[in-house]
Image (tube, coloured by chain):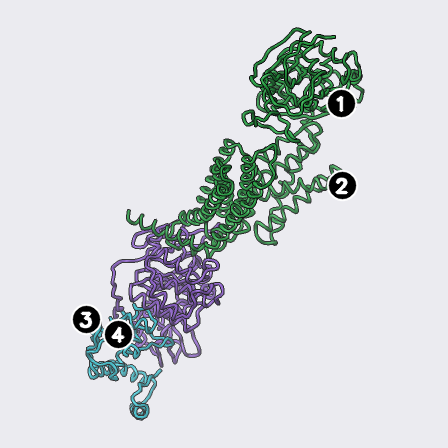
Amino acid sequence: MTAQKFSDKRGLRYFAFLLRQNWPALVTNSIVLLLINVVIYSMALSDLLAGHTYIYLNTYDRIGSLILEYRVANVIFAALLAVLWGCTTMPYLNSKVGVNFHHSLPLKREHHYLYEVGAKVLLFVLPMGVSTLLGYLTTVVVAGDLAKNTGVLFLSVFINAVTNFVLYYAILIFAASFTGTGFGRLLTAGMIVFMPSILLSSLYTICDYSARYSSFTWITDIGERIMLPIRSILVAQGDKYTNVLWELIGAWLIAAVFLFCGLLIYRKRKSELSGTPVLSKIARGLMKYTTIFVAATLFAMMMEDFADGVVGIFIGGAIGALLAAMLMNTILTKSAKNMFAGVRGLVISFAAFCLIFTVVGFDLIGFDTYIPAPASVRMVTVQLGGVEVELTDRDDVKRVTEIVHTYFQNGLEENNEYDAIRTVAKDKYYDNDNMTTEDALRLDLLNIADSMFSETFYVRVTLKTATGLRFEKRYHAPANGTHEEILTIMANSEDFPDAYFGESAVYVGGGWMETPLDDLNYDSYKLTETYARQLWHDMRVSFNGMQYFNRPALACVMLDGTPVYRYPYYDGNEDAIRQYMKQLTSVYVVNVKTGEMKEYTDSVTMESMLRAGILDSTTASNFAPKDDTYVFFGIVGEKSNFNYICAYFLDGQIPAVPLP
Amino acid sequence: MIVGLITVDYRDRKLIYEQLVDNVKDLILHGDLKRDEFLPSVRALARELGINPNTIQKAYAELERQGVIATLSGRGSVIVFDKDSMARSAEDDLRGEIAPLVMRAHTLGMTKEAFLSLAEACWDAAAAGKDTDGGDENDQN
Amino acid sequence: MRPLPGRILTEVTRMIKIESVTKVFTDVKSLDRVSFSIPSGTIFGLIGSNGSGKSTLMRIMCGVFGAEEGSVLYDNENIWENTKLKEKIVYLSDEQYFIPHCTLADMRALYRSLYDTFSEEIYESLLGTFGLDPTRKINTFSKGMQKQSAVLLALSVCPQYLFCDETFDGLDPVMRQMVKKLLAEAVADRNMTVIIASHNLREIEDICDRVALLHHGELLFNRELDDMKLTLQKIQAVFQNREDADALSVLDPLSVEWRGSMATIIARGTKDELDYEMKRMKTQFYEFIPLTLEEIFISEMGERGYDCSKVLG
């Protein structure tokens, strides 16, 4: 027992020695962090407070956003520092003599590892903590009341930075235990962090090569997910705390795994291998052959432009594989003499590359045009006309899959014939007599997705089978009958209104912004919008959507009293308007202040109310909601599937103006 | 300083501990080390000469075995022989060495007279050298 | 035969025991079932050519790395990851390592933190003796001064066991002598055990009391130096007739070389024993010549059938 305590004391003394020995690192780290989190930050903060306010974000939020920027900066700094220190920790691993020295000291190997690692972590954490604390205090001093709750943000800066530091540091220490040498360490760590994503990118390139219809973006999505550097910065940018929390926990788990494995390897290390690049054959092999694959792909793509397609690919692949093999041999054995070693491995890996490329890249298996059987598809997501709808209804799914399946089976004809409905729709655009709201809707879809005069649909469909496989296809379909049906299915689906109208959006000061309902500022303009949106959630209506032609509506009235028409056709065309209004099934009236809602179904009343609103509304420059301000919504069709006209009354009562 | 008196010659092929033993005995013989004087401690001598203390231990043990010194616990090794007893001991050794020398001469075919005259000549030379050098010991071989 | 005067043991049966140590480095057997023991308070010489495994053995004895088979015990305690034992050990490797960009003062801090036996007085006094500046970066020192620094630090620790791997190589004769003195003093003081690895037999001869020879990872022998010298003799004898020399066979000599009518014989036995035999032979003249360590080795190796030019590098 005493012996144990005795040795702990010694270890702690050694730890103290390490801390003292590394004082330059502590000092530079502290200076940089103080510079960032206190000096530069306080300047930015003062600047912010002194500057003009932006409409769309109050000062409190802008301070929060500033701190989030600094969070990103701190995270980047933490990652870079972790890489630098990771390369210089335990420098004795580089030399036999160094290892001989350190391992002859009265200190257990685990303690060596733990104390060295721990010292550096501590030397980061302390200045980080101090600087974030000072940053918070600076905010309190400079911004006063506005600083409330920024403490949490600064805490998150600290936690994020420390987490990232530990994560990257752990990876480098793990690499260090593996390889020892400074450069080898960096190489191994770099490979661990980047190679999976790069490999996936190469795979994607190959898959995508002759994929005319298939989309493989899910491959690069995975690659992005596991690309730690990007992820850590993205996480730092996010401000949804719960998501970040899971990311942080995940990062700590990964770090712990790396550190633990690093310790295991360190203990097993044979000191006589210090100085030689990579410890295990497997690691060496992995590094080499992944690089060969990536380089082969890269050069294949480069040569493909240069020489004749197929030939270029294989020649390029060969060149890339050879160069990569030479490079990795030299790096991994630290001598140019072994450049041409491992010929057999090179040949095998090049053969594998050729095989993969031939099968996948040239799509010998016909994956590109493969559509699974309609019976096996559970869910379909269709993007058509600029709207993406998720179909879960079994019949819908089956039907859409059948249509696409048939289309692919029939050879994916690119049909340039002018589409009948399109013709009709276009004609109807100018057809005063026959324009219906359905046509208007249809035209909407077509117009938004394609240019006014396009002759095909751009279709993007994702089919998910019961087994969880995903097939993404994108293609152009002629605007003929079969895909027309898809359009109908889409428009009638449950998901459509949400997909089509999107989430609640507020048009503020020049741009769209998503804001949760409760966070809205209740100035006069937004009050109305709030109620409008409330109603929209019930009724799926949006004033702003209509204004920008995303929502089908006949017209609406601006706050200054000018009516805005969806189609110029209706502008000043009373008859057309009246015609349109004949189709109304009900009008809902909402009191802006109380939210009280009334429904009117009498057609005369409806028409007169809306008419008055649209045609006769007066101008008011400063809109202030009064007890008797109302919003009127005209509905065509069922509540669940509708079109609307919407109008504002600035004030006054519900008129009962009879039609002339 | 007694410590400074004792030396070893590394070039000499004789074992170091034997050199030390002979060295101490010579010093007693010449009166540089007197009876009842204490030899330097193993430690001091080891430090001075830079030789293995075990070797010095061996030398002291051998000296003790020969009765030249005696080790008193806690106090060190004290010289027991005086100049005379040392001389006598040395003479005994010499006697042992003369016999084979004579044998060799005899085997070579030297006459008794030749041997004796040779011995006499050497003796005269040694006596003369002793006078001029003032007591230096002459090493042969 | 006169018994060899024994060393007075201050502590009975304290020793380092190397038991059947085998070490394999990726297919190469560096040490093959090496077994021997080193009594405490000995200055032990480990000899072998480059690649004989002596450095490897040293490092295993210091617990730098472990052996595939076998173990090293200090008074029956295994050295592996035994920090309590390691506190009594300092390893002076042939190439010195210092913390990058450190000064002697920094290294002192390191040693002080890890070794309770570190002595400030000795450190200070050695600084003066060696004349080194503790505030200068060690990487600005010359190679010899770096070696001195390493020796200085090792001695300041006052270890119970000191391992010197080719330590005397980079030192000038004056420094060498000084280091020997310091070692001798420490051995005398506290019964420090010193293990010196070298291929310079001259160095070993001067200061070691025991030597062991390693060759290709095998221990060829392990004996007291004086014992070897006393029990192996070189005789130069002149024979009038060659036939008379046949009588030499009674000595069972290791080697007999002729130059003219003079034979140089190397044979086992004490001087007295062999003298007794030589007297009985018909020689014109004979004399005993003390052997150097090198000659001893060559003979021993020759007897075992090794070509010495390979063994001693």
On the image, the x and y values in percent for residue A576 come to 76, 13
Q: How far apart in space, not on screen, are marks 4 and 2 (Cα)?
A: 93 Å
Amino acid found under the numbered disc labelled 2: Ala
Among the chains pictured, the one given purple colouring is: C
Q: Residues within 10 Å of mark 3 (few under 14, many from 20)?
A: few
Q: How far apart in space, not on screen, are marks 3 and 2 (Cα)?
A: 101 Å
Image height of A223 relative to A102, above or below? above
* Chain under callout 4: B
**Residue carrying label 1:** A456
Q: Residues within 10 Å of mark 1 (few under 14, many from 20)?
A: many
**Residue carrying label 3:** B72
| The colour assigned to chain A within the rendered structure | green
Residue A165 vs residue C29, the one in the foreground: A165
Task: Report the mark closest to the observer, 4 or 1.
Answer: 1
* Chain under callout 1: A
Q: How far apart in space, not on screen, are marks 3 and 1 (Cα)?
A: 118 Å
Task: Report the mark closest to the observer, 3 or 1.
Answer: 1
Image height of C61 relative to A524, above or below? below
| Dot 3 and dot 1 within a common chain | no
On the image, the x and y values in percent for residue C37 come to 33, 58
Residue A510 vs residue A190, the one in the foreground: A510
**Residue carrying label 2:** A307
